[in-house]
Amino acid sequence: MAMWDPWRGCQKYSEGCLYCYIHKGDLKRGVDTNNIVRTAQFNKPIETHKNGQYKMPKGLVYVCFSSDFLIEAADEWREACWQMIKKRQDCMFLFLTKRIERFEHVMPSDWSDGYDNLIIGCTIENQATADLRLPVFSKLPIKHKQIIAQPLLERIDITPYLDDIECVVVGGESDQNARALNYAWVLDLKAQCVSKQVRFEFRQCGTHFIKDNKRYKLSVKDLIKQAKKANINYIP
């Protein structure tokens, strides 16, 4: 999977951002994450070698790993990125956003019913953000939609919003002060996905993890591995 960060920096936006790993990492390096800056790899998707071949390989491309593609501070740069995404039809681009309500205001003029080579993940963390963002998300003309429930902070019901969703990804929070992830919430979301025939992926445990009323503290390096061991992913 290729990474493309046309800009970096982000501002905390909702409860799920409290222990954001990007902010934590930047703080250690003395970087102010709140400053949104265009990066040197802005044109990465269309950069070519001398023979004309693209430097960035075809396949899945994760966009804005250290920011939010729909963040307000990047409005002046986004149109160029839309066009690079459209040009690279050999790639499948993926970005996640907590700002899905901005999408209609910043989508490209040639969007129509959506780009074939773009997956958009709407991030939620609790019932309040699910009920705020997912009704908006469900009405948008996007061809490939995912719901990202990470960090999952409580039991939530997203059944009303699953009709056009390709995948639901669930994960816990990774921080010494992290809020606990209850495995029962994860299984409940899986059951909702199964009932609607929607792909489900348990991406990672939380640093603090509750299973069968027992509380565990896990190492950050083991969070993805332990989720995989649970073997509860679902493919219709």
Image (tube, rainbow, N blue to C red):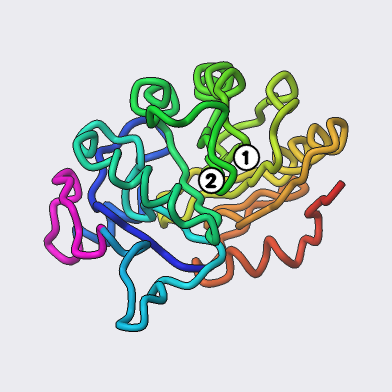
Q: Main secondary structure of the magenta part?
A: loop
Query: Helix or strand or loop: what does disc 2 sit on?
Result: strand
- How many numbered tags mark residues here? 2
Q: Nearer the viewer, residue 169 or 174?
A: 169
Q: What stretch is highlighted in magenta?
A: 28-42
Q: Earlier in the sequence, mark 2 or mark 1?
A: 2
* Nearer to me, 53 or 217: 53
Which percent across, then down, holds residue 57? 48, 72
**Membership of 21 in magenta stretch:** no
Can you say whether 171 is above or below 3 in the image? above
Asked if disc 2 and disc 1 are in contact, CB closer than 8 Å, the reply is yes
Q: Dot 1: within a 10 Å radius of its alpha carbon, few (fewer than 14), some, or many (20 or more) residues?
A: some
Q: Residues within 10 Å of mark 2 (few under 14, many from 20)?
A: many
Query: In the depicted view, which residue is nearer to us: 199 or 175?
Result: 199
| Residue labelled with disc 1 | 144
Q: Residue at x 40, y 72 (%)?
A: 54
Residue positioned 49% across, 66% down in the render: 220
Instruction: Describe the element under mark 1 as helix, strand or loop.
Output: strand
Q: Which residue is drawn at 33% across and 47% down?
A: 81
Q: In which quarter of the image is residue 113?
A: top right
Judged left or right of residue 27, residue 5 is right
Q: Residue 118 carries which label?
A: 2
| Residue 104 position within the rendered picture, expressed as x and y whole percent measured from the top left | 42, 21
Q: Which amino acid does label 1 sit on?
A: His
Q: Which amino acid does label 2 sit on?
A: Leu
Nearest the camera: 151 or 166?
A: 166
Outermost residue toward the front in this view: 51
Q: How far apart are marks 2 and 1 (CA)?
A: 7 Å
Q: Residue placed at 77% from the left, 45% from the top?
A: 199
